């Protein structure tokens, strides 16, 4: 005898009780079917000329920064460099969309975003050179340490944003991650907590086509990465990641929404990694030259330069001035990076904990003894490293 056949049983209901119903209407959370664009559309006419020129100057400087850092790696001055060539529009727009009081949470490929936010290029590369835990004071610059483990910076961004909201601080966190990072558990945990807490955080996914050698199609079957937002209860936006004013607009809108209590947003910027994953990678093993060449026609600098030229905002003199400024930056970076840094081995134990653990004290004593035995100079107390 089934439940329905029991005497006095109520009629069987084919649907769950009302509690199953969506907490939010999913329709407004879904991204547009095509990436949002400004350049080459009617929206370009309304773009602020000063913003376009600022974006252009930062893109040119960013491209030169990338090529110089790559050259330094080949010369042995950097241990590794993950280039963002081709992705400069995402990097620059992320920096310019934030206010000074906001926080940027970059990944290892986002040194350019940190530089565009005002960080000294040498400080941005210090970690990749192997000189220090990180090359700058995160609190001074409102830039979290460059994160090499995939996606672990995302929960940190949510925690900071949630804490700021609890304290009543008018602060937004912008967390950057690659498409490969969306396959990590930290990504999903961060989005879930951010949506539940309505934390003022913006997630920017730079979908550059590959997680090292793994194409996006082998990571997810979702219509887009932006579609993942609806599963957590936040809006998803899809934008052309090589269209600098479009990325800046979408990010600025998401930052403003977060600042005014609207909660988090997931943005997928569709772009392309023109160079190898790092200097240790051989990209020819998993992609062809024809694919790379096709993306060269959609270069973010080329797209913006075309718009500025057509509007009469960019002439030869201004172009030369922008190029000269970028070359000056590269020359200074090259000169400073070619100088050997003065390092104290005892700094290894600085800034690990507020107070050293017994194990760290034991390790520090062992290293100090080894240095003394070799007759090498080192701060005998490690005090310099504690306050550096």
Image: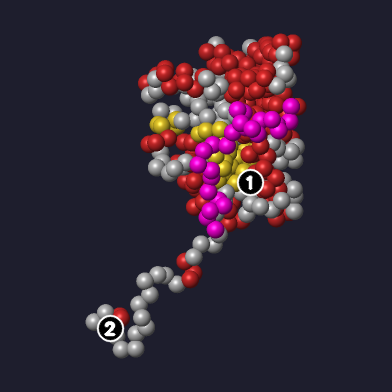
Q: What residue sits 62% from the left and 28% below the top?
A: 39
Pinpoint residue 37: horizontal percent, then vertical percent: 59, 33
For mark 1, what is the residue? 201
Whether the magenta-drawn stretch holds residue 37 is answered as yes
Q: What residue sits 58% from the left and 16% below the top?
A: 67
Whether the magenta-drawn stretch holds residue 302 is answered as no
Q: What is the quadrant of residue 121 in the picture?
A: top right
Residue placed most toward the observer, 219 or 306: 306
Residue placed most toward the observer, 59 or 200: 59
> From the image, which quarter does the N terminus lie in?
bottom left
For mark 2, what is the residue? 5
State the residue lying farthest toward the front: 42
Q: What residue sits 36% from the left and 81% below the top?
A: 11
Camera sees residue 323: yes
Q: What is the quadrant of residue 374 in the picture?
A: top right
> From the image, which quarter does the C terminus lie in?
top right
Pinpoint residue 250: horizontal percent, then vertical percent: 63, 39
Pinpoint residue 58: horizontal percent, then vertical percent: 68, 23
Residue placed most toward the observer, 359 or 97: 97
Q: Give the SS element for disc 1.
A: strand
Residue extent of the magenta highlight:
25-49
Camera sees residue 383: no
User: What predominant SS class does the magenta segment belong to?
Assistant: loop
Q: Earlier in the sequence, mark 2 or mark 1?
A: 2
Q: Nearer the viewer, mark 2 or mark 1?
A: 2
Task: Give how far apart the Cα atoms at labels 2 and 1 are.
Answer: 53 Å
Image position of 280 (left or right of 36): left
Image position of 276 (left or right of 106): left
């Amino acid at each position: 005898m089934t439940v329905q056949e029991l005497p006095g049983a109520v009629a069987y209901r084919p649907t769950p009780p009302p509690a199953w119903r969506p907490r939010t209407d999913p329709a407004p959370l879904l991204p547009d079917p095509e990436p949002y664009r400004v350049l080459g559309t009617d929206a370009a006419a309304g773009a602020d000329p000063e913003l376009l020129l600022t974006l252009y100057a930062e893109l040119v400087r960013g491209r030169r920064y990338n090529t110089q850092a790559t050259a330094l790696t080949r010369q042995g001055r950097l241990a590794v460099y993950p280039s963002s060539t081709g992705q400069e529009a995402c990097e620059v727009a992320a920096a310019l969309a934030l206010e000074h009081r906001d926080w940027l949470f970059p990944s290892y490929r986002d040194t350019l975003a940190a530089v565009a936010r005002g960080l000294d290029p040498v400080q941005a590369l210090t970690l990749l050179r192997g000189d220090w835990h990180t090359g700058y004071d995160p609190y001074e610059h409102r830039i979290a340490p460059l994160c090499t483990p995939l996606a672990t910076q995302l929960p940190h961004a949510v925690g900071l944003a949630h804490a700021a909201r609890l304290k009543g601080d008018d602060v937004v966190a912008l967390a950057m991650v690659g498409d490969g990072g969306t396959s990590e558990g930290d990504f999903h945990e961060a989005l879930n907590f951010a949506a539940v807490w309505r934390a003022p955080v913006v997630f920017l996914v730079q979908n550059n086509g590959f997680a090292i050698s793994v194409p996006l199609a082998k990571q997810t079957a979702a219509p887009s990465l932006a579609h993942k937002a609806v599963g957590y209860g936040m809006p998803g936006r899809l934008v052309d990641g090589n269209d600098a004013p479009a990325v800046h607009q979408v990010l600025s809108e998401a930052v403003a929404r977060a600042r005014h209590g609207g909660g988090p947003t997931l943005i997928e910027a569709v772009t392309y990694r023109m160079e190898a994953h790092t200097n240790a990678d051989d990209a020819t093993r998993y992609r062809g030259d024809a694919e790379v060449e096709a993306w060269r026609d959609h270069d973010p600098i080329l797209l913006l330069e075309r718009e500025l030229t057509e509007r009469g905002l960019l002439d030869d003199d201004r172009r030369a001035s922008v190029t000269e400024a970028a070359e000056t930056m590269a020359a200074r970076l090259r000169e400073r990076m070619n100088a050997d840094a003065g390092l104290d081995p005892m700094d290894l134990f600085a800034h690990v904990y507020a107070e050293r653990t017994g194990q760290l004290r034991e390790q520090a004593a062992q290293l100090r003894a080894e240095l003394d035995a070799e007759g090498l100079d080192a701060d005998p107390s490690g005090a310099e490293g504690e306050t550096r």
